[in-house]
Image (cartoon, helix red, strand yellow):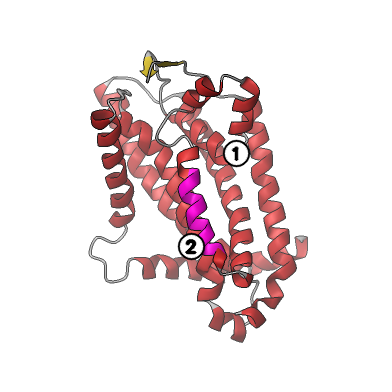
Amino acid sequence: MVNELRELLRYRYLLAQLVVRDIKVRYKNSFLGFLWSLANPLLQVATMTVVIKYVMRLDIPNYSAYLLVGYLPWMFFQMALLDSSQVVLAHRDLLRKVYFPREVLPASVVVANLIHYVLALVVFFAYLLFYRFFMHGAPLQWTVLWLPVLMAMQTALIIGLAFYISCLNVFYEDVKYLLTVLLNVFFYLTPVMYPAELVAEKLNSPLLYKLYLLLPMNALVDAYRKTLLPPITGLTIRDTPIHSQPLDFGTMALAMGICVLVAITGYAFFNARKWVFAERV
């Protein structure tokens, strides 16, 4: 595996070219360009904010920022996996004609989506600074320093899953349809629209709650909120009082281990099957 990683580094120029091509193709003939990658989550967040605050009458303070800080990492997760399901088949002609490390393909779509995610976070930080500093006179918390760690964990998780998905879809094209269904299900299981503490109150079991947070995206979304936003206080949802909990570093360490394990096993799974792709596509 070490030799394959070294070879991948030798082909970093090809990786960069594929990333640039992916970004250019995505916004080809688009007047707004990159702004569309911001418009989609912002419109989704605006819609969900209206539903939660004015239809369901759940008064969560500054819900738009609270939702956005969970929705942006989810969009990175969702779009990278959906793109990875198609990436090998989309480059079938290249696979048949040119030698290159096949893992460049799923890696390129993950990196392209990571770039979009970073740019979206820059815009979110501008909003966060305006909301916290200029409107409330509150500086950012020191916990914001954990942000690069969380992003690295999420990228490791996504690249591992992308290796699995891109490989499996070569052999079973049903994978891309199943993936869409699973992502829709896991969106509601992940604490994007609601605080993770609500799950803790409903489960009423510390053990079950820890198992819930061992799903890496659950732990990551919760950690993004706890590192970027102040704790929620005095909130009650449908007669259930929500008690804000501090970031659990033990749980985060386990989640980090799972993310790294997924990345390693995903790469090994992909690496063991990549040379038959040209025959299958």
Q: In the displayed structure, does residue 107 sit left or right of residue 59?
A: right
Q: Which mark is residue 215?
A: 1
Crowdedness near tag 1: few (<14), some (14–19) or many (≥20) residues, C-alpha within 10 Å: some
Q: Amino acid at mark 1?
A: Leu
Q: Nearer the viewer, residue 103 or 179?
A: 179
Crowdedness near tag 2: few (<14), some (14–19) or many (≥20) residues, C-alpha within 10 Å: many
Q: Which mark is residue 270?
A: none
Q: Where residue 186 sits: x, y (%)?
A: 50, 44
The quarter of the image holding the N terminus is: bottom right
Give the overall secondary structure of the magenta segment: helix
Element type at mark 1: loop
Q: Which mark is residue 83?
A: 2
177 part of magenta stretch: yes
Question: Which residue is painted at 69% across and 40% down in the image?
Answer: 257
Q: Amino acid at mark 2?
A: Asp
Residue 108 visible:
no
The quarter of the image holding the C terminus is: bottom right
Q: Where residue 79 sits: x, y (%)?
A: 45, 56
The first of marks 2 and 1 along the sequence is 2
How many numbered marks have been drawn onto this rendered protein structure?
Answer: 2
Which range of residues does the magenta coloring cover? 175-186
256 part of magenta stretch: no
Element type at mark 2: helix
Distance from label 2 to label 1 (Cα)? 22 Å
Q: In the displayed structure, does residue 105 sit left or right of residue 78?
A: right
Whether label 2 touches label 1, CB < 8 Å: no
Question: Which residue is painted at 40% across and 41% down in the image?
Answer: 71
Residue 112 visible:
yes
